[in-house]
Amino acid sequence: MGLAATKTRTAAPRREASKSRGGRPTKSAAIERDQRLIEVATRLFLDRGFDATSLDAVAEAARVSKPTVYSRYGDKRGLFTAVLRREIARWLAPLSAAAETQLGSSSDISVERRLVEIGREMLNFTTGPDAMAFSRMMTSQAINFPDIAKLGKEEGWLKAVATTARFFDHLVAQGALDVDDTTIAAEVFLDVVVGHTHRMATFGTPMELKAAEKRTRAAIKLFLAGAIGPADRVQSAPKAAQRRRPSR
């Protein structure tokens, strides 16, 4: 019964892109095809990992011909690079949006509150399951394919630093921060706010969101203690209110 059913089952029709008079796909059809390929490849990479995903499997799942995939991306590394570039853009979008929101916010809002909002957005997209999966894949493939690691640095980390540095430039212009190099300040901020949590999640030991947010708030307070400027601009607590070091 099962064997007969297998033999008589008709294959699902392959979805071909609409073609122009010259036989090539129209521009809109080509864009739609590429988007479908990237979506399918993203899911397969996440489900199976880099090594277990083949271009043949992607072509079959996306219902496009194998020559189309090979001609478009060359090899699996080329396809993974395209997927990674799109995912990085998606991860950076919330940070850019948060920075733009804070740039337009009232100057009455404290610097700490603004940074907490940006830090929360950073946590949300850097510790998500998809971000963690791609981070682990990048780490595992970096030795064999240095250009993938370079892409992660240039398209991901450096753009995140640049976005944060522009926001810090705005705060410096307002007199809310006193730092000489906003790029270095941005690197330090991103590292202390999400670096530890991201590394732990990459290693497979993610923190609970409440604990991660608590750590982010504490990191921001430490960051501001050095970035807010001269000592006379820092509101020091009364000596009588000194806190005890918690017992271990």
Image (cartoon, helix red, strand yellow):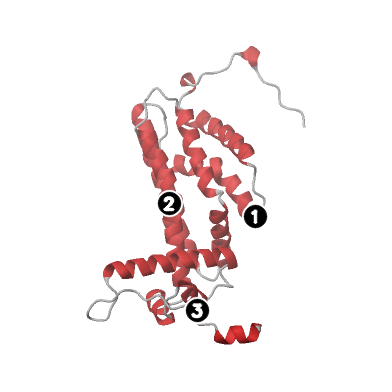
Type of amino acid at the residue the image marks with label 2: Leu
Identity of the residue drawn at 44% across and 71% down: 78
Type of amino acid at the residue the image marks with label 1: Phe
Identity of the residue drawn at 46% across and 20% down: 233
> Measured from the top left, where is residue 237 in percent x and y?
58, 17
Q: Which residue is mark 3?
A: 56
Type of amino acid at the residue the image marks with label 3: Asp
Question: Could you tell me how far apart the alpha carbons at marks 3 and 2 are, in whole angstroms?
Answer: 34 Å
Tag 1 secondary structure: loop
Residue 158: numbered disc: 2
Residue 107 in sight here: yes
Q: Quadrant of residue 172?
A: top left
> Measured from the top left, where is residue 48 in percent x and y?
59, 68
> Measured from the top left, where is residue 166 in percent x and y?
36, 40
Q: Estimate how packed mark 3 is, as few (under 14), some (14 to 19) or many (20 or more) residues with alpha carbons within 10 Å.
A: some
Residue 147 in sight here: no
Question: Which mark is in front, 3 or 2?
Answer: 3
